[in-house]
Image (cartoon, rainbow, N blue to C red):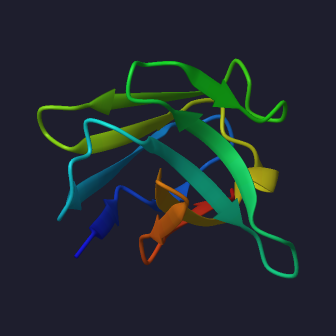
Amino acid sequence: QVQLVESGGGLVQPGGSLRLSCAASGSTFSIGVMGWYRQAPGKQRELVAAITSNGITTSADSVKGRFTISRDVAKNTVYLQMNSLKPEDTAVYHCNYFYRGANYWGQGTQVTVSS
């Protein structure tokens, strides 16, 4: 059974940084796509960034140049380095694993950007 456990969220001031981690277990994570989505109150869940098994990345325009996704295949872990955080980045961030048409989700970690 696939399990995704996020960590690293918290409260940060505008302009600050956070690093999210997602530890995966229960599957062969060397293949498939891993990503981060976020959902703010009253809004739909949206893709933040994703990375394929061979390291190809994509990210939302709103985070380009500020957020970086990376993946440690040996540790079955995906990271999201978030810099220059803005209040509009406040949301619950969810880890996602997509493989063979199936989506798996973590419980999410809260990120709050506020002074």
What quarter of the picture does the N terminus occupy?
bottom left
Residue 40 sits above or below residue 98 on the image: below
In the image, residue 16 lies at what x, y percent?
56, 37
In the image, residue 24 lies at what x, y percent?
24, 57
Q: What residue sits 13% from the left and 39% below the top? A: 75
* Camera-side residue of 101 and 93: 101
Q: What residue sits 66% from the left and 27% below the top? A: 58
In the image, residue 28 lies at what x, y percent?
21, 48
In the image, residue 55 lies at what x, y percent?
43, 19
Locate residue 34 relative to residue 58 in the image: left or right: left
Direction front: furthest residue: 100
Q: What residue sits 45% from the left and 68% below the top? A: 104
* Camera-side residue of 59 and 99: 99
Direction left: furthest residue: 74
Locate residue 26 relative to residue 21 in the image: left or right: left
Residue 92 sits above or below residue 66 on the image: below
Locate residue 70 relative to residue 60 in the image: left or right: left
Residue 39 sits above or below residue 37 on the image: below
What quarter of the picture does the C terminus occupy?
bottom right
Q: What residue sits 47% from the left and 54% below the top? A: 100
Tag count? 0
